[in-house]
Amino acid sequence: MGVFTSARVQHALLKGWHAWLAGSFLVAYVTADENTYAMHQFAGYAVLAAIVARLAGGLLVPAGSPLRLSPPDPKATLAWLSSRKGRHPLFAWFAVVLLAIVGLAALSGAVADSAAWMEHPHEAISEASLWVIVGHITFVIWMYAGKKGVARVTSWLAGMRLSNLPKERAR
Ligand code: HEM
Ligand code: HEM
């Protein structure tokens, strides 16, 4: 167990877990079509397993560990708003909202597997979770790369959309 108590190892575990969650979410999202249902099911359950593992790990590790999940504190958020000192409280808010909505998307999928009435709510929750993820990624880029990073990504996305337009015919 000794090696798992090192903060460096715990950060590496968190990164590995993040890749597992983000990767399986991406696969589940792009395979939601009926033709690729088996893969959708596999990736969706991988998302569910990642969320369950994070909740179990986050509640079982001792306080102070980088893996510890502690709910965001509204009082500390208000204090941060007036002092602007310390870690941005949106990190913690995003973590709980993401875990909740992505977990609900996967759980409702598991229910929709045997109860057809859950298909529409499952689709709606999954689409909503994608928007929360877009917010999460924008926030992370903003915090780590600043305004320039966000501008670079949005102009890259705009460029991608433009490059999909039919090219003007050369005369
Ligand atoms: C390119 C895409 C992504 C990037 C660059 C990214 C980046 C990050 C970073 C840097 C953190 C740590 C934030 C901190 O310092 O506290 C984080 C946390 C998190 N991300 Fe992402 N992320 C991406 C995609 C996703 C996706 C697709 C999901 C969900 C399916 C997701 C879910 C989460 C969750 C739940 C946390 C909180 C982890 C925890 O503390 O338990 N991320 N992300
Ligand atoms: C977070 C993970 C998941 C995401 C993002 C996701 C996303 C989606 C989306 C967007 C749809 C709508 C597809 C469409 O009709 O165009 C869908 C449908 C569906 N998903 Fe998931 N899903 C996830 C997990 C799961 C899981 C774990 C299962 C369990 C097997 C599942 C089962 C289903 C079923 C039964 C449908 C309805 C298929 C149909 O319309 O015929 N999903 N999912």
Image (cartoon, grey):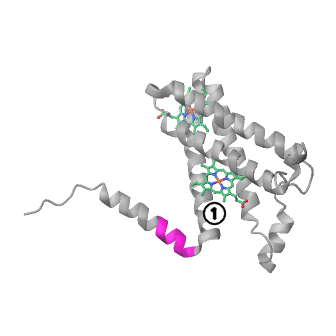
User: In terms of depth relative to the viewer, which is nearer, 25 or 94?
Assistant: 25
Q: Residue furthest top?
A: 114
Q: Residue furthest front?
A: 3
Task: Read off the residue under disc 1.
Answer: 140
The magenta stretch spans residue 141: no
User: Where is the C terminus found, in terms of image quarters?
Assistant: bottom left
Q: Residue furthest left?
A: 171
**In x, y percent, where is residue 145?**
59, 71
Give the vertical position of 84 relative to 31 (above or below).
below
Secondary structure predominantly adopted by residues drawn in magenta? helix
Instruction: Look at 77% across and 78% down and name the residue there.
Output: 84
What segment is highlighted magenta in the picture?
A: 147-153
**In x, y percent, where is residue 25?**
59, 41
Instruction: Look at 88% across and 50% down and name the residue there.
Output: 5
Q: Is residue 72 left or right of residue 33?
A: right
**In x, y percent, where is residue 30?**
48, 39
Q: Is residue 110 left or right of residue 52?
A: left
The magenta stretch spans residue 151: yes
- Quadrant hosting residue 79: bottom right
Q: Amino acid at mark 1?
A: Val
**Dot 1 surroundings within 10 Å: few (below 14), some, or many (20 or more)?**
some
Instruction: Look at 74% across and 58% down and name the residue there.
Output: 93
Q: Is mark 1 within 8 Å of ligand 1?
A: yes
Q: Quadrant of ligand 1?
A: bottom right
SS of the residue at dot 1? helix
User: In terms of depth relative to the viewer, which is nearer, 138 or 18?
Assistant: 18
Q: Residue furthest bottom?
A: 83
Give the vertical position of 102 relative to 119 (above or below).
below
**In x, y percent, where is residue 36?**
47, 28
User: Where is the N terminus found, in terms of image quarters?
Assistant: top right
